[in-house]
């Protein structure tokens, strides 16, 4: 939590490091946290929207349809093969039978876990696996959303088109806001010209 009238910056985790974290968590049998990371980096949903998901929302479906809590806007997210493969493995690892069940329920099965708990577990996991050095700001579930954004930008050579697409995905008012949100620097943009 930040102090009143101060601004904090959430870091991002490089996409390949986040994918590695999923594998490490799966190896540790920490399937719920692995699933949270997977949903975060492959869909770009906010933490509160991730926590409200049920297994039926993602299993055996080509896309996820979600009304965002913060904006009230409807999003349709194509679920790629990498994500569905991970989701199936983690679903099997958790031994879930009822697809009506929320994905992220507490150990008693009585209610959904809280975002503060996820943030704490995420910090611990990054530290335990010596991956915190790949982040540069606050570690929270929000960094997974930014990881998706940074991956899209890198894969599209930091193009204006990628910024426009991400602006739509994140429901930002402008690509300039998306650029600031992702922390894309002028130096990174200047390097684009080296690729020509």
Image (cartoon, rainbow, N blue to C red):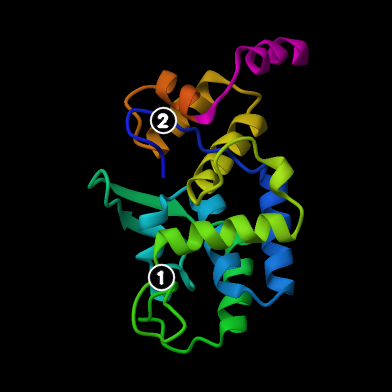
Q: Residue at x 60, y 74 (%)?
A: 31
Left or right: residue 34 compared with residue 193: left
Say whether residue 55 is visible: yes
Q: Is residue 193 magenta?
A: yes
Residue shown at the point (68%, 67%) measured from the top left? 25
Residue 74 in the image, given as x and y percentages of width and height: 28, 49
| Element under disc 2 | helix
Residue 173 spot, x, y in % from top left: 32, 26
Find disc 2 in the rendering and name its residue: 167
Nearer-N-terminus badge (2/1) = 1
Measuring 60% from the left and 30% from the top, which residue is drawn there?
153
The quarter of the picture where the C terminus appears is: top right
Magenta region includes residue 66: no
Q: Is residue 166 left or right of residue 33?
A: left
Residue occupied by mark 1: 113
Residue 38 visible: no
In magenta, the rendered stretch is 182-196
Instruction: Give the residue at x 44% y 25%.
Output: 164
For disc 2, the neighbor class at 10 Å (few under 14, some 14 to 19, many from 20) is many
State which quadrant residue 49 falls in: bottom left
């Amino acid at each position: 939590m930040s102090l009143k009238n101060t601004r904090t910056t959430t870091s991002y985790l490089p996409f390949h490091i986040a994918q590695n974290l999923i594998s490490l968590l799966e190896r540790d049998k920490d399937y719920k946290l692995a699933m949270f990371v997977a949903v975060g980096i492959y869909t770009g949903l906010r933490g509160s929207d991730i926590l409200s998901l049920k297994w039926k929302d993602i299993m055996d479906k080509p896309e996820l349809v979600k009304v965002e809590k913060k904006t009230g806007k409807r999003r349709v997210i194509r679920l790629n093969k990498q994500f569905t493969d991970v989701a199936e493995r983690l679903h099997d690892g958790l031994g879930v039978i009822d697809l009506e069940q929320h994905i992220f329920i507490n150990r008693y099965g009585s209610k959904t876990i809280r975002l503060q708990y996820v943030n704490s577990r995420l910090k611990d996991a990054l530290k335990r696996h010596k991956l915190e050095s790949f982040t540069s700001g606050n570690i929270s579930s929000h960094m997974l959303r930014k990881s998706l954004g940074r991956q899209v930008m890198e894969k599209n050579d930091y193009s204006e088109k990628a910024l426009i697409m991400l602006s739509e995905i994140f429901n930002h008012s402008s690509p300039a806001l998306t650029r600031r949100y992702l922390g894309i620097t002028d130096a990174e943009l200047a390097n684009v010209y080296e690729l020509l």
